[in-house]
Image (cartoon, helix red, strand yellow):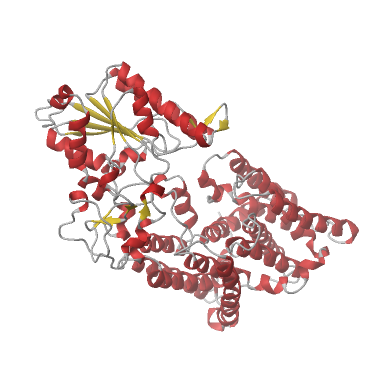
Amino acid sequence: MPAPTAPYPARASIRPIRRESLHRPHIQGLRGVAVLLVLLYHTGLGPDSGFIGVDVFFVISGFLITGLLLREHEQTGRISLLSFWARRARRLLPAGSLVLVATCALTWALLPASQWRTVGLDAVAAAGYVLNWRLAGQAVDYLHQGMAPGPLQHFWSLSVEEQFYLFWPLLLLVLLKLRSRAAVIVTGIAVVLLGSLALALTSTGSQSYFTTQHRVWELAAGALCAAVPPGQPRSGRASAGLGWIGLGLLCLTLVLVTPDTKWPGPQTILVIVASMLLVSFGASAFILARRPLTWVGDISYPLYLWHWPLVVLASRDAPLSTRDGLAIVPISIALAFLTSYLLENPLRRLRIVSTARVSIALGLSLMLVSGAAGIALTQAPSLGAPVNPVGAGRPVEVQKSASTLAPSPANALQDLPDLYARDCQTGLTEATVHPCEYDYRAARKGPSVVAVGDSRMAQWLPALQEVARERHWHLTSMTKASCPFTDARRAVTAQQADSCLAWNQSVLRRLLDSPPALVVTSDLDLYVTARDGTPLHGKANQNEMIRGAASRLTQLRRAHISVITLQETPTVQNNPADCVSLHLGHLATCSTPRDRATRNAGVLQAASKLSKVPSLDLTDHICTARQCPAVTGDVLIYRDAYHLTATYAQTLAPFIESGLQQLLTPKLVSELSLSR
C-alpha cells in the first residue's frame, strides 16, 4: 500500500500554504470574543455562562485546521503529516511550555506544599497533552471531589485540541484516498460529528466534560464549515442575515446557559450552531472584524494560557474579589502581549526552525522540559514527620505551630484507610458490594463486626482495625462513596440514587443472612434527599434523613442484630491541609469554630434515639470546647473538609474501645472481648 505522503527530503522546509482565504479578520474577532468570555467568567467579571468560549474555540480550531489541510491537498495533491504537525508544534508548544514551567515555579513559591504533587502531576499530563484524561479520571473519583481546581486545569481543552490534531489529518487522508469529492468529505465529517454528539447527549457521567470522544463533535462542526463546497454563497443579504443570527444566538445562549447546565448537552448545540454561523458568515457582522476584538484574537492563545494560573494564585487564601479580577485582566493581557511579540512572532520568523524535523524536535524538547518541571515539583521536599506523633493521645488543643507533622500536608490526601488501596469501596454509580475483610481471630474463633456506611464510615476503619487486632475480631467493611446506610432516596442523578438504594438493599440482605455480633455505622452529617422526585430542604430534609437512617437501624434491631452509630464528624473549613501548609507558624488560623463545624450534626443521634440503639459521640476527641483545630499533638486531623486522616483516626482507637465498653450490653461486651 503506498504511503499517504511522498518521501520527505532530509531537510525539507515546512510547506507553505496560501492563506488568502484562511486569515479572516472576523475569525480573529471571534477568537477575541471567545477568550474574553472565558477570561471575564473566570475572574468573576462576566456572565456565569462565559465558559462557552471554550466551545467557540473548538469550532474555530476545527474550521481552520480542516481548511488548511483540504487547501493543501487541493494545491499539492497531498497532505504532508510531518509538515502539518511541525506547524502545530511551532505554533503551540513554545508558549504552552513557557506557561507550564512558569506555573510550576510559581506553585513552588506561592502555593502550599500540599498542592505541589497534584500540580506537578498536572504539569506532566499537560506537557503530554493528556490532562483532559487525568481530569476525567478525577471527575469520577470520589476522593478527588471537592478539590480546588489547580492552576493548570485549563490545559484540558488544549489537550482535546492536540489529540484532534493527531488523528484528524489521518481521517482526512483516508477520506481523500476513498474519493476526493466534497460529498465524501462532508459525509465522513458528519458521521464523526453525529457519533460524538450522540455520546455527549446520552452521557450521564461528569467525566464527559473533559473526554475527547464527547467533545470532538464540536471541532467536527467547524470542520464541516470548512468542507462545505465552494459553491455555497457566503456574501450578500442572506449571508449577512445568517451572520447576525449567529451573533444573536450566541448572545441568547449566554443568557440561557448556567454553570448547572449539563455540558456538553442539548444547549451546547446552540453554541455550536451559533459558532458555525459566525465562522461561515460572520464577516457580515462587521463588529467582529474590527479592533480591538481582532487584536485580542491575535493574542488569544497566550491570553488563555496565562489568565487561569493568575486566577488560582490570586484566590489561594480567599475567594477571588472584584478587585482581584480587575487586576488579573490587564496583567493577563500584558503577559499575553509580551509572549506573543517576544516569543511567538520571532520564533515564526526564525530560519533555524523552518524545517519540519527541527520544529518537531524543538516541540518534543519543550514537552520534555515542561514534564521535567512537573516531575521536579512532585519531588520537592516537604514537611518532615515527627518522631512520636501523639494525635488524640492527649487532650485536644489548638496547637500554635509545627515544624513536623504526620502526615505531611503534602501527603494528606494520600493518608487513607487501606480499603482504598484494596479497592473495597463501592463507587458513586456502582451497586455491587465490595467488602474488605480483616481477620484478626485466633484459630478463626471470635466475634464478627461489620462497618457499614459512606466514606465517613470508611474513615473510622484504621481505629476499628486497631481495636479488632487487639480484641481478635473478624472485621468487615462495606462502604459506598456518598451513600449512607438508609432507605431515603438522595437528590442526585438517577443512576447514583438508584445505585445507592440497590447497594443498601444488598448490604441489608448480607447482614440479615449472616448476622454479625455488631454492626457499626456512620455517615456524613446531612445529605439532600428527595421525595417523589422533588428535593427536600431544611427541616423536611433533616426529618427524611432521620427517618431513613432509623428505618435501617430498626430493621437490624428487629432481626436481633446489635448496632451502634458513630456520630457525624465535624465539618471544617475547606482544604485544611493547604491552610496548614501556609500557616505553620500560626496554626490557629486553620481552626474552625465548633458550633459552625457541628451545625448540621445530630441526624444519627436522633435516628439512634428513634430506633433505640446506642450512639457514640467522639467530637470531644476531635475538637476543643470552642474550636475544631486542624492540628493537635503534631498530627494533621483532617485530610479534607469532611474526612479525618488515617493517622489521626488510628489514635482514636482507645476512645472507640472505651465507648463500646460503656454503651454496649455486658453480654455483648463479653462476646467482643472488651474488658471493662
Q: Quadrant of residue 53?
A: bottom right
Q: Quadrant of residue 581?
A: bottom left
Q: Quadrant of residue 27?
A: bottom right
Q: Nearer the viewer, residue 124 or 657?
A: 657
Q: Is residue 161 left or right of residue 571?
A: right
Q: Is residue 169 left or right of residue 32?
A: left
Q: Is residue 492 visible?
A: no
Q: Nearer the viewer, residue 592 or 535?
A: 592
Q: Position of residue 43 (x, y in %)?
A: 58, 64
Q: Position of residue 342 (x, y in %)?
A: 57, 82
Which corner quadrant holds the N terminus? bottom right
Does residue 350 lie above or below 117 as drawn? below
Q: Determine the residue positioned at 26% across, 23% down.
A: 562
Q: Determine the residue positioned at 12% across, 37% down.
A: 470
Q: Is residue 50 visible?
A: yes
Which corner quadrant holds the C terminus? top left
Can you name the residue that lies furthest to the front here? Answer: 625
Can you name the residue that lies furthest to the left here? Answer: 443
Can you name the residue that lies furthest to the right here? Answer: 237
Does residue 151 lie above or below 210 as drawn? below
